[in-house]
Image (tube, rainbow, N blue to C red):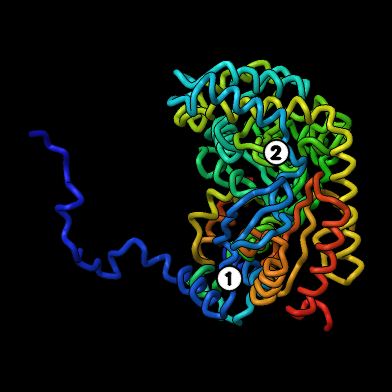
Amino acid sequence: MSDRAEIVEAVTAEIEPFNKKNVTVTEATSFQHDLEWDSLTVMDFVAAVEDRFDIIITMNMQAEIETVGQLTDAVAKLKAGQ
Amino acid sequence: MTETGLQAEALPVDPPVVPAERDLFSKFDPLLAERAALLASGVRDPFAIVMEEVRSPTEAVIRGRETILLGTYNYMGMTFDPDVIAAGERALRAFGSGTNGSRMLNGTFRDHMAAEESLRAFYGMSGAMVFSTGYQANLGVISTIAGKGEYVILDADSHASIYDGCKMGDAEVVRFRHNSVDDLDRRLGRLPKEPGKLVVLEGVYSMLGDVAPLNEMVAVARKHGAMVLVDEAHSMGFYGPNGRGVYEEQGLEGQVDFVIGTFSKSVGTVGGFCVSDHPKFEALRMACRPYIFTASLPPSVVATATTSINKLRDAHDKRRRLWDNARRLHAGLRDMGLRLGTESAESAIVAVILEDQVQAVAMWQALLEAGVYVNMARPPATPAGTFLLRCSLCAEHTAGQIDTVIGLFGEAARLAGALPG
C-alpha cells in the first residue's frame, strides 16, 4: 500500500466516529457539505487526526481544506516535513 | 450649488428587488428561518430583552415587571456605588461627554492616565493600557504581539474576541482541547522551537463557569519557551488576595506575561485593558491598530472605572458575599437535580445544562415571567452543542433573592420538563 493510500485509510477511520449520516467517504467527500459537520465536530476531528499522525494542522491550514483528498495532501506534506 | 451626493428623497419609492443569487443577505436565510420558527412556537425572543428601568445592580423592570437580574456580569455590584457615580459626574462636567479622538492623538485626558495608574497599582505591574472595550483589548494585543511566522496557541473554548484577535493577526493559530494540560503540552512539543509563541488562556471560562488549571498550564507554556496571556475578564475583584484573578489565586505572580481585563464586568462600566511587566510594553501604543484607530473612552467612563478599581482593591466584604451567593445558588440548583456546568461553585457563573433549545427557551421564559432574568446561551457559543441557562451572581444579591430564584427555578424546570413534575 502506498503512503498516500495509508493516509486515506487512516483519515477515513478517524472520520467514522463522527460520520453520523453514514456517508460513503471518498477523497471527494466534503467535510462541510457531505458530512455536514459543524465547527465543534471539525475541531474534535482535527484534534484526533493531529494526534494520530503526531502533527499540527493550524487553523490557517484548516481554512484551506474542504475535502478528504485535500486533508490527505496536507497530512502527507506535514509528515514529509518532520 | 454644491454636490452632496445621492439624496434620500431622490431614491425610488419602490427600489427594484435584488435577485436572490446576487443578494448578499441570502446567506442569512437559515438564520432568519430558525429565529422565525422559534418565535412561531409562541415564545418570547430571548435576544431582544429591554431593561425599561434599572433600580439597582440586581433589579430591573422588564415589560413593566420587576425582575431579579441573574444574568449580568455586574459581579461586584459597582454600577450604583455613590463614589463611582460622583466621580463620573465630576468628569462629565469638567471634561465633557466625549474625547472625539484616538488615544494616540487628542483622546488621552487626565482621567485616562489616572485609570492606567490605578490598574498598575491594582495588579502591581509596570505597564497598563486602556482600550475602548474588552473585545478590542484581546483583538489588539493578540493580533499585534504574535506576527507572521509566529504562533498563537489557544484553548478551544476561548471567547470570540480571542478567536477574532487570531483571525485579525498574521500568526499561525493552533488550538488545544479545553483545559487539557496534556493536549497543550503535546501541541507545543510538535511546534518548531525557534519561532515566538503566545499561549492564550482564560482564568474563568464564561459559558460553564469553570476555572482553568493555570498553574499547570503556565508551567507547560514556560517549559516550551512560550509567552503567556491570561484573560481574567470573569475573575477580577474576587480571586486571589488582591482580587487580581485566578492567576493570583493559583500563585502565578510574575509568571504571566500579559493579563487582559475589562471594565464591563466587576468594574461596572465599559472598556478593556492589558497589564504587563514587559519592559517594551509601551511599544504596543504605536503598533496596536484597535488601540489607535478608534475613539478613546469618554472621560466620565474612565473616571468611574478608576474609582471602582480603587475600591475593588479592598472590597473584602463584597468578595465574601459574592462567593456566599455563588455557593448558595449552586447548592440549591444542584440539590434539586439540575445538571450544572461545574460540580461545585468554581466561579460567579452557575450554568444549567439543558437538552435542547425548546426546553431551554421554555424554562427561560417561565423564569422571566416569574420575575427572574438569566442568560440563555446556545451553540456555537456553548461547548459541545449544549443549551445553557447561565446565572451570574452579584455581591449585592441578598440571600432572600437567591432563595426566591431557587424556588422559581424548580417551578420553571418542572414546567419545561427538565425535572420530573
Looking at the image, the residue that sits furthest to the left is B1
**Which element type, helix, strand or loop, lies under badge 1?**
loop
Residue B339 pos. (x, y %) = 82, 68
Q: Chain of mark 1?
A: B
Viewer can see residue B199: no
Residue corresponding to mark 1: B44
**Quarter the N terminus of chain A occupies:** bottom right
Decide which of A6, B375 is in the foreground and name it.
B375
Question: Residue at point 62% right, 34% down?
Answer: B272
Q: Where is B351 relative to B93, above or below?
A: below
In screen coordinates, is B330 left or right of A61?
right
Residue corresponding to mark 2: B80
Decide which of B371, B34 is in the foreground and name it.
B371
Q: Amino acid at mark 1?
A: Arg
Q: Nearer the viewer, mark 1 or mark 2?
A: 2
Residue B343 pos. (x, y %) = 88, 59
Residue B226 pos. (x, y %) = 71, 33
Q: Where is B55 relative to B352, above or below?
A: above
| Residue B251 sits in quarter | top right
Q: Where is B176 relative to B357, above or below?
A: above
In screen coordinates, is B149 left or right of B56?
left
Spatial CA distance of label 1 from label 2 is: 29 Å
Q: Chain of mark 2?
A: B
Decide which of B161, A37 is in the foreground and name it.
B161
Residue B188 pos. (x, y %) = 72, 42
Decide which of B160, B410 is in the foreground and name it.
B410
Q: Are marks 1 and 2 in contact (CB under 8 Å)?
A: no
